[in-house]
Image (tube, rainbow, N blue to C red):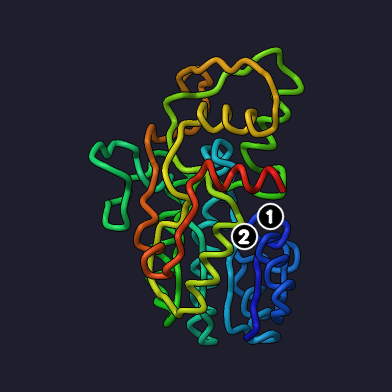
Amino acid sequence: MRYIILGKNGQLGNAFVKKLKNQKKECLALSHKECDISDLNSVLKVFEEYRPDIVINCAAYNLVDKAETDYWNAYKTNALGVRNLSFACKKYSSYLISYSTDYVFDGTKENGLYTEEDLPNPLNEYGKSKLAGEKWLLEENPEKYLIFRTSWVYGEGKQNFIHKLMNWVENNDYLKIAYDEISVPTSTRTIVEVSLKAVDQGLTGLYHLTNTGYASRYEWAKKILQIRGIKKFIHPVSKDVFNLPAKRPDFSAMDNGKISRETKVEIKSWDEELETVLSE
């Protein structure tokens, strides 16, 4: 089986590349410069030359606040890029795996975690661009596809909350972290493991892929510092204090039960997985 990983320099793409190399899989990993997914000709050229069986799209515009004004670039990658990959996968009979976000939801659900049956209603341009990518993928109708909605992804790299938190620890006497923004911290390791299991089983459709449980940003930050043995006062505050350009949902935690049942993978709780990852 021939794999293509798009977005190899991001934390998720990097995790996939390492895993597939360890498994001795035939894998072509490409950066944005090597394949701009918003350019259909660039995509088709790669597909024609490599003829992939499985395409894992980790390319993403994930600057949530910047997307409020730079929305065209967000849509180019998160929506148009996914559409181009879907078109190419249909043309070349490739299996497409693409990633979306909990930010497709508005956070107003009160009677449980978000499931795949809940209707999306994104509050910001980033969430809208990701939802457009989901819809455009389905419009192109590739024979085999997986859409995974993830949340608060962390792994090796700088574009995640843990890296930012460590910078704040170094540069501030105390921290202010939001108590009213709640979702699920999810490791790249979990995403890679479950994604590849789903591919091996030939699953198709939309799934929520997170670690289990949920936490506020404040709880997540406290747990990170506790695991790392760092003593720093954290003041819980409302997220409104930060006056960020992009509106975030209050509660966007998703239920991973569907993918867990279908892959027969018992997905670790967010805090247990965090402890495992940070201790390695």
User: Along the line of sight, which residue is nearer the eye, 45 or 224?
Assistant: 224
Indicate left or right for 114 with 241 as reference. Answer: left
Write the residue at 62% across / 79% down: 44
Tag 2, which secondary structure? loop
Can you name the residue that lies furthest to the top here?
Answer: 173
Q: Is the residue marked by circle 1 packed among few (<14), some (14-19), or many (20+) residues within 10 Å?
A: some
On the image, the x and y values in percent for residue 174 come to 65, 14
Q: Which residue is mark 1?
A: 10
On the image, the x and y values in percent for residue 115 come to 31, 53
In this rendering, is residue 202 above or below 227? below
User: Along the line of sight, which residue is nearer the eye, 24 or 273?
Assistant: 273
Write the residue at 50% across / 24% down: 178
Tag 1, which secondary structure? loop
On the image, the x and y values in percent for residue 265 come to 46, 64
Write the residue at 62% across / 68% down: 39
Marks 1 and 2: which is nearer the front?
Answer: 1
Residue type at the position of mark 1: Gly
Question: Gap in Å between the C-alphas at discs 1 and 2?
Answer: 8 Å
Residue type at the position of mark 2: Ala
On the image, the x and y values in percent for residue 50 come to 69, 85
Indicate left or right for 257 with 230 as reference. Answer: left
The answer to the question of whether label 1 and label 2 lie on touching residues, with beta carbons closer than 8 A, is yes
| Disc sitting over residue 59 in the figure | 2
Indicate left or right for 69 with 169 as reference. Answer: left
| Disc sitting over residue 227 in the figure | none
Can you name the residue that lies furthest to the left here?
Answer: 111
In the figure, residue 247 lies in which quadrant? top left
User: Along the line of sight, which residue is nearer the eye, 151 or 36?
Assistant: 151
